[in-house]
Image (spheres, grey):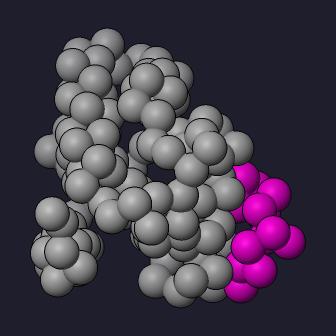
Amino acid sequence: MFSLNTFTFVICVLWNQNFIKADLPPEKLFVEALKCREESLATRDDLHSIALRVPPETMSGKCTLLCMMTNHGLVENGRYNQENTYQFLKKHFPERPMMVRDMEEAAKNCQYISDKVPEDYQGTCEHAYILAVCIQENLKGVKM
């Protein structure tokens, strides 16, 4: 079973890694986060953090990530959707066909991580944060 201590350790390790920069300009990320502001009670700092591709540490910021992931189908009915994540990544890296295998692998690896998240964490703001960090960690070696 996946203990909370292991869960916390994984997050700390992933958090300390460098994050990727996708083909989503900061202003588009900001607008996407802004759409979730009312639902998540995101602060201005949360929105700016997301726009700069830095996963927010606040609960409101993590809930903004959940809202955004739900809006784009990365999370459906509280569950991570590997195929939708892969399609989302392909859509946002259209001019990088050499990355397709990396995107597919990232989506698959994050499914593995998501499956290890305790049942009571599935579909939560913390779960969305774990997924965001996982996706970034799995693509960090890809030159953007």
Quarter where residue 15 is shown? bottom left
Q: Is residue 142 magenta?
A: no
Residue 124 horizontal/vertical position (percent):
54, 66
Instruction: Using residue 138 as the reference point, say whether residue 86 is left or right of it.
Output: right
42 in the magenta segment: yes
Query: Which quarter of the image is occupied by the C terminus?
Result: top left
Q: Residue at x 31, y 60 (%)?
A: 117
* Quadrant of the frame with the N terminus: bottom left
30 vs 7: above or below: above
Say if 108 sits above or below 53 in the image: above
Give the left or right position of residue 77, taking residue 92 as reference.
right
Magenta span main SS: helix
How far across and down, in percent of the image, does residue 94 sit? 46, 18
Q: Residue 16 lies in what quarter of the image?
A: bottom left
Q: Position of residue 114 (x, y in %)?
A: 32, 50
Is 138 placed above or below 84 here? Answer: below
45 relative to 30, above or below: below
* Residue shown at the point (65%, 67%) measured from the top left: 64
Q: Residue at x 57, y 50 (%)?
A: 78
- Along the viewing direction, whichever of 22 and 72 lies nearer the viewer: 72
Residue 1 left/right relative to 86: left
Left or right of residue 130, residue 66 in this image: right
Q: Residue at x 53, y 58 (%)?
A: 123
Q: Of residues 84 and 7, which is closer to you in this image? A: 7
The tally of labels here is: 0
Q: Which residues are magenta?
A: 31-44
Q: In this rendered view, identify the residue nearer to me: 7 or 21.
A: 7
